[in-house]
Amino acid sequence: MRLTFRAIISSAYAKSFRLLGGLFTKKTFRKIIRLLYDPGQSDELKAFSAALGMFLAIMPIWGFQTMAAISLAVMFRLNKPLVFMFSHVSFAPVFPFIILMSFKAGGYWMAKPSTIVNFNLAHLGDHLQQYLYGSITLAIVSGVATWLLTFATLKIIKALKQYRAALRLKKAL
């Protein structure tokens, strides 16, 4: 049996979508919520854990993202499962969009930006430089946005829990 390139790619995408579907089960969602509610860690630490994972997911260190995420999480004493989870946002269906957005973001740093239309292998060094600048920029912006969103979400959840507890106390009296 001979596998074609198209069959291999479609198989990889199918596996990625199955993996993605497995991430959104009730059991996985409960684990994520438990990690976010860990009372032994501050909201800032949890938000930094998520931001570092997102940053490393977009950085162009292909194949070393998980190893870098775990190493840095241990070194900085972060929430290891959160760092690990957020470092896996660059899976197969999303990866082309990350590359495209990185390439576009890198265009802002270049004096003569390349476009996808005029992409040719003769100027691969220019294209690679634009991609690297863009991926670092996108990683920083995504990390900061992830920190802000995670921190705000955790604070809102904490405020809602306190509000509900106050309502229950009022009803009890």
Image (cartoon, helix red, strand yellow):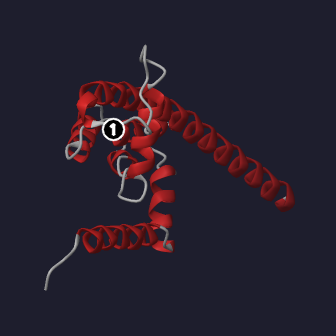
Q: Position of residue 35 (x, y in %)?
A: 45, 53
Locate the N terminus by quadrant: bottom left
Q: Is residue 167 left or right of residue 126?
A: right
Residue at the extreme top: 111
Query: Is the residue 12 above or below the residue 148 in the image?
Result: below
Of residue 103 and residue 57, the one placed in the foreground of this image is 103
Residue 7 sits in quarter: bottom left
Q: Residue furthest left?
A: 1
Q: Position of residue 88 (x, y in %)?
A: 35, 52
Left or right of 18 on screen, residue 4: left
Residue located 35% across and 58% down the image: 92
Which residue occupies 50% across, 50% down?
A: 36
- x%, y% of residue 39? 49, 46
Q: Is residue 67 above or below residue 170?
A: above
State the residue at coordinates (36%, 36%). 119
Residue 17: which quarter of the image?
A: bottom left
Q: Residue at coordinates 29% horizontally, 70% vertically from top-left?
A: 6
Which residue has dot 1 on it?
A: 56
In the rendered image, the quadrant that contains the C terminus is bottom right
Compared across the picture, whether 152 is left or right of 65 comes to right
